[in-house]
Amino acid sequence: MKNFNDEYYIAFRPSGDDQIYIKPDLKTSHRKYHFKQLAFGGLPLFFLNGFKNEDKNRWPLTDLFVDSSGLLISDEVKSNLGNYNIDGMQIYPSVYIDDDDVWHECYWYLGFYKELDCLDRDNSVIETFDFDDDDDDLLEVKKFSLDKNVLGKIAESDRLIFKIANCSKSYLFFHKKVVDVIVRKNFSGVRFIKVSDFSEGEQY
């Protein structure tokens, strides 16, 4: 049986502060893009530099930007990833507006409106985390382990990227085949940590 913890990686921002930290503008935020399916044909999503006043265009644009629950990816990254047909994943037209208010319309937001319940609770290090505002009990995962019984029943092409359900952290998990493409093309703006090597806090 495969060890899926060695096949999958979690996406994080690169280390250090010498980079752009994106944030949605107010209208984009209200569209709940990070968990709601968006109808194509509407306005794109708009993102800004979260530290515009401090940075003043000091940092270069990257091929990918890691958001709290997804990725902003360039046209080139999108074309290299291929046409995935993954349930619940959407790649939506987006715009990054830089510190000089110049629009960069070559981006897409990769996110999920469905999550995959594939956490191996017996072999993960977890604790219950209670969100008072919506009264949902989510799992605060300190170390992930992926459920081989769940993933083993899903075709590999349908689980190349996913977000785990019922967890307080909205990390994206990438199959090694996708990570290999991003690394081989030397796309900037993201780093990956293998699931088997990751413990919460090590990304900082």
Image: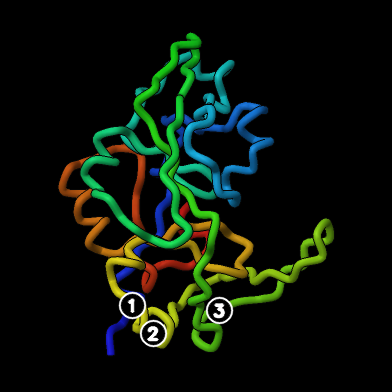
**Residue 138 image-quadrant placement:** bottom right
Residue 75's spot in the image, x, y percent? 29, 33
Q: Is residue 55 above or below residue 23?
A: above
Q: Looking at the image, do the residues carrying marks 1 and 2 touch, with CB atoms under 8 Å apart?
A: yes
Query: Type of residue at label 2?
Result: Lys
113 to the left or right of 92: right
- Disc 3 or 1, which lies upstream in sequence? 1
Residue 52's spot in the image, x, y percent? 55, 19
Please tell me which residue lies in front, 135 or 50: 135
Q: Is residue 132 above or below residue 181?
A: below
110 to the left or right of 191: right
Dot 1 falls on a residue whose secondary structure is helix
Q: Looking at the image, do the residues carrying marks 3 and 2 touch, with CB atoms under 8 Å apart?
A: no
Q: How is the image coloured?
A: rainbow
Look at 36% across and 38% down and name the residue there. 73
Query: Type of residue at label 1?
Result: Phe
Q: Residues within 10 Å of mark 3 (few under 14, many from 20)?
A: some
Give the number of the disc on residue 148: 2
Residue, disc 1: 4
Whole-number angstrom distance, CA of label 1 to CA of label 2: 7 Å
Q: Residues within 10 Å of mark 2 (few under 14, many from 20)?
A: some
Look at 41% across and 87% down and name the residue there. 149
Please tell me which residue lies in front, 168 or 166: 166
Query: Type of residue at label 3?
Result: Val
Whole-number angstrom distance, CA of label 3 to CA of label 1: 16 Å
